[in-house]
Amino acid sequence: MLAAERNASLNTMQAYLRDLADYEGWLAARQDSVEAVKQHKIEAYLRDLTKRGFAPSTVSRRLSAVRQFHQFLVDEGDRSDDPSDGLEPPRRDKPLPKVLSEADVDALIVTAQRESEQSDPSKPAGWRARRMHCLLEILYATGLRVSELVSLPASAAKGQREAIIVLGKGNKERLVPLSGPAHTAMAAYCGVLPKSRRSSPWLFPADSETGYLTRQAFARDLKALAGRAGLVGKPISPHVLRHAFASHLLARGANLRGLQKLLGHSDISTTQIYTHVLEERLKQTVEDSHPLASRHRARR
């Protein structure tokens, strides 16, 4: 159903599989089943997740999976009631996204560019250095999800396009602008790609099950690059760079609706995690422009 009716990605389906396998295993260990479980048992399962040290966000996700599964059982006629109906997820504070400063991102990109220019393109380390520079330029220029980035088609590098079509969650397409530096980095990377990989349908081909670079490999290489760029102790991951893209755009005057489209969020509420940036910008505007603020600065 998730695949056929909701166009769920493989990662989403694997996450549901893990969550529901844990739920079913917990019930089986207590001589219970999904066909007969009562609401108090599901409540006990949620309490047990907390005892096991799972974060409120994880418990909420598990509850969401359980709810949707029980609703599926009702829809299919396997149960006449939904024992998860009315259950509330644990309350949790929404943490602000981890963000790198513009200077941090610049240090990453400058280091990647320098390494790509100084390496021998005829050797594996050389074209991989150009690949890392290309990945960084595209990611910071577009704010793509890491799964969208590594699975870009080879056609994305064809011509001097001002935008590329990205296939996002739920197989929804969106148009994403592409910067000049990203085009330049792509051309440099594609120009040194080994001949054995040029026939691949993917922009970042690799010897993996999918045929393209894995998210894990990119995240690993990114952390290694961050160390060489002197960003020791900084929160570094592809998703943090996506947050940096969004936060830096808002700080420079972008609006939330436009950012929602660029990020591929189906709901504006998801994009609203970045409102702290807007709040800071408004606060700074008042500090810089309000007459009383200027008087206060003069008195200090």
Image (spheres, rainbow, N blue to C red):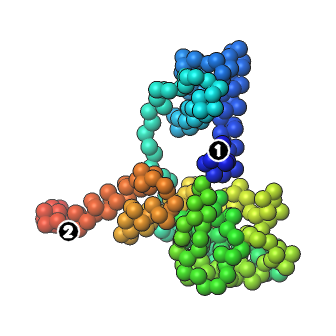
Residue at 61% x, 69% y is 136
> From the viewer's perspective, is the residue at label 1 or at label 2 nearer?
1
Q: Is residue 20 above or below residue 204?
A: above
Q: Nearer the viewer, residue 248 or 14?
A: 14
Please tell me how crowded label 1 is: few (under 14), some (14-19), or many (20+) other residues with Cα within 10 Å: few
Quarter of the image that includes the N terminus: top right
Residue 169 place in picture, x, y as percent = 59, 56
Q: Position of residue 96 (x, y in %)?
A: 44, 49
Q: Position of residue 20 (x, y in %)?
A: 66, 32
Circle 1: element type: helix
Question: Dot 2: within a 10 Å radius of its alpha carbon, few (fewer than 14), some, or many (20 or more) residues?
Answer: few
Q: What residue is at 67 percent from the left and 68 percent from the top?
A: 152
Check disc 2 and report the residue beneath it: 289
Nearer to us in this view, 48 or 6: 6
Which quarter of the image is occupied by the C terminus?
bottom left
Between 138 and 82, the residue placed more toward the observer is 82
Q: Residue furthest top?
A: 31
> Percent from the top left, x then y, of residue 132?
68, 70
Residue displayed at 62% across by 83% down: 184
Residue 46 location, quadrant: top right
**Callout 2: SS:** helix
Can residue 272 be seen by looking at this rendering? yes
Residue occupied by mark 1: 2
What residue is drawn where x is 68% and y is 16%?
32
* Residue 123 visible in the picture: no
139 over 36 or under it: above or below: below
